[in-house]
């Protein structure tokens, strides 16, 4: 995957403050909880489907480059070119803001419910 450049200029698709009491944090990892990567990806995919009205046809690549901690303020940012969508999940509560996950998905044409 190409290195994400200028994600700061990409529009924000959604925001989520991770509750320290989120059930996915229990046991992931005891004593030092982090938000599971699968939960980050699921949240982004839901945001994208709601925003575009289209289902994700394929996850081409995902890279987890950092950790999101309980209480983190996350933003999903996207760069859309037709059905090709690059994304970055950013922890905006850290200083400076940093990418915790990024990747590339293909959205299906048509209705998400199809």
Image (cartoon, grey):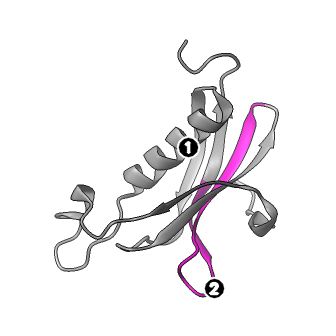
Task: Tell me the quarter of the picture where residue 69 sits.
Answer: bottom left
- Badge number at residue 96: 2
Q: Residue at x 58, y 26 (%)?
A: 55
Q: Residue at x 53, y 79 (%)?
A: 93
- Please name which of the two marks, 1 or 2, marks the residue nearer to the observer: 1
- Is residue 49 on the magenta stretch? no
Number of marks in the rendered image: 2
Q: Secondary structure at mark 1?
A: helix
Specify few, some or many for label 1: CA neighbours under 10 Å numbering under 14, 14-19, or 20 or more.
some
Say if residue 78 shows up in the picture: yes
Q: Are marks 1 and 2 in contact (CB under 8 Å)?
A: no
Which residue has dot 1 on it?
Answer: 47
Magenta segment boundaries in residue numbering: 83-102
Q: Position of residue 28 (x, y in %)?
A: 23, 65
Q: Position of residue 71 (x, y in %)?
A: 38, 74
The front one of 31 and 63 is 31
Image quadrant where one finds the C terminus: top right
């Amino acid at each position: 995957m190409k290195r994400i450049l200028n994600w700061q200029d990409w529009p924000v698709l959604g925001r989520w403050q991770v509750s320290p009491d989120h059930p996915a944090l229990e046991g992931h990892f005891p004593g030092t909880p982090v938000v599971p990567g699968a939960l980050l990806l699921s949240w982004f995919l839901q945001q994208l489907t709601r925003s575009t009205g289209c289902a994700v046809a394929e996850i081409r690549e995902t890279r987890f480059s950092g950790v999101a901690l309980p209480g983190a303020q996350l933003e999903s940012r996207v760069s859309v070119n037709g059905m090709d969508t690059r994304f970055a999940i950013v922890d905006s509560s850290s200083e400076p803001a940093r990418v915790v996950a990024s990747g590339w998905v293909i959205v299906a044409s048509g209705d998400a419910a199809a």
